[in-house]
Image (cartoon, grey):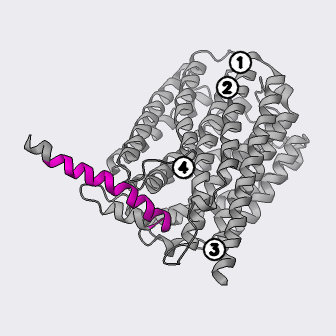
Amino acid sequence: MSSSRAATPAAARAEHARPQEAERAARDPLAAPQRAARAPGQLAGASFAMGARGRLLPLSVPMRFFGAAAAFHLFAWIALALGAPQVPRFAGGIGWPLAALHALTLGVLAMTAIGASLQLMPVATRQALASRRAIDAVWWLYTPGVAALVVAMALQQPLAMALAALPVVAALVVYMALLARNLAGARGMAGVRTMGWLALLALAAALASAFAMVATWAGWAAWPRPALLMLHITTAVFGFMGLLALGLSNVLVPMFALAPVPGERTQLSIAALCAAALAPTVPVAFDVWPPHAALWAIVPAAAASAWHVASMRGVMRLGLRRELGGSFRLVRLAWLMLGVTWALGAWWAVDRQRAGLVTALVASALLGWLSSFAFGILQRIVPFLVAMHLGGNVKRAPTPSSLTDERALTVHRVGHATALALLALAIALDSPLAALTAAIVGSVGALAFAAFFVAVLQRTARARAARSC
């Protein structure tokens, strides 16, 4: 009884402190994570935010990547609409569906991953990136290159595809060098660093397989296309983008929830499971192992995913900020679709001939899991970064919520979820009409997200103008 009486006032004080900390976080987004890191009995998780302002890139750098992602997002849905007759049973080949796929993977997901990692890795590793010129080179090579590549795919021009791929590959090589140098000299956050190294290895494999496929399309070589395609999808989607999503979650979710990060042992164990999942995909892709051996990859991948989601939910339970808004509905949808993705992957491993199963698996991974996660995070990180740049000790600095157009984000979330459901229906029923409807609804959602991004830029400009008066 005495211990119960002692615990009750402590719990009451903790609950009373949460809204006060959330209010302070609105005024200064970095101050509350620092206080959370010093909370008694908690891991020093949010301490990665300490001194983060000194390692922030100029606001224009991550924002240009995020803005380009918003533009490619709209293009991806339009391309999907133009290729709707082929979408439900799409299994490769040049045309509008392939352009939509790469507008999403390269233009949205990888673009977001590059912008987020260039900003967040220096915060997590506690050291600045080596070269601003190299970051500018990544932008000027990558963005026009991706635009040219997806247009060449849509117009079915293999030689133009090969030429457009060159600046994209060059940009990604520079990006890899930047990130590798930052990771090599990093201190702390061992789990994030390990995920970063694994993501870079996967990206190298994805680039090699992509180059081999482009060379085959252009007639320069004759590589086994099915093996290269599986290797490319696995290393690009589940390797590079998937590992970055899991690794950066250990920074982003605690930062937004004002909570400690998961323990390093948990992070490193999840990274080990991810590595164990990627390894068997190579012999399966090249038919060294039978198709059902893919289950040896799916089992550790599913275990890593379940452990990761459980750790993130634990972070959110410990957080000083309990209400994370509508953006985290998309994050929770992403975690749900991650489980669906592994279920579809297991089905594919035992039944490769099922019509539409590959399309469903790729759509679940890209739109259900990675896109939901990326846009859920972008809805918070875009105004959050602006508030960090404009905040600090400045009086009447804008808060993330004051920079956010919630109506536009609501339209986007509804549009994204509805389009995902309609696309699932299109694949299940082999219905081009449902695919076209999904693309139209997705385009409306993409326009709403673009409106949110433009609103942030406009409110940022007004806040800067007010400060200069």
Mark 4 or 2, nearer chain start:
4
Q: Distance between the Cα atoms at labels 3 and 2?
A: 40 Å
Which image quadrant: the C terminus? bottom right
Q: Nearer the viewer, residue 97 or 71?
A: 71
- Amino acid type assigned to the residue bearing label 1 in the image: Ala
User: In the figure, residue 93 lies in which quadrant?
Assistant: top right
Q: Distance between the Cα atoms at labels 4 and 2?
A: 23 Å
User: Is any part of residue 364 visible from this angle?
Assistant: yes
Magenta extent: 6-30
Crowding near pointer 4: few (<14 within 10 Å), some, many (20+)? many
- Amino acid type assigned to the residue bearing label 2 in the image: Ala
Element type where label 2 sits in the image:
helix
* Disc 2 target residue: 360
Mark 1 or 4, nearer chain start:
4
Element type where label 4 sits in the image:
helix
Residue contact at pointers 3 and 2, CB within 8 angstroms: no
Crowding near pointer 3: few (<14 within 10 Å), some, many (20+)? some
Mark 1 or 2, nearer chain start:
2
* Disc 4 target residue: 244
Which residue is located at x 86 percent, y 25 percent? 85
Which residue is located at x 56 percent, y 43 percent? 242
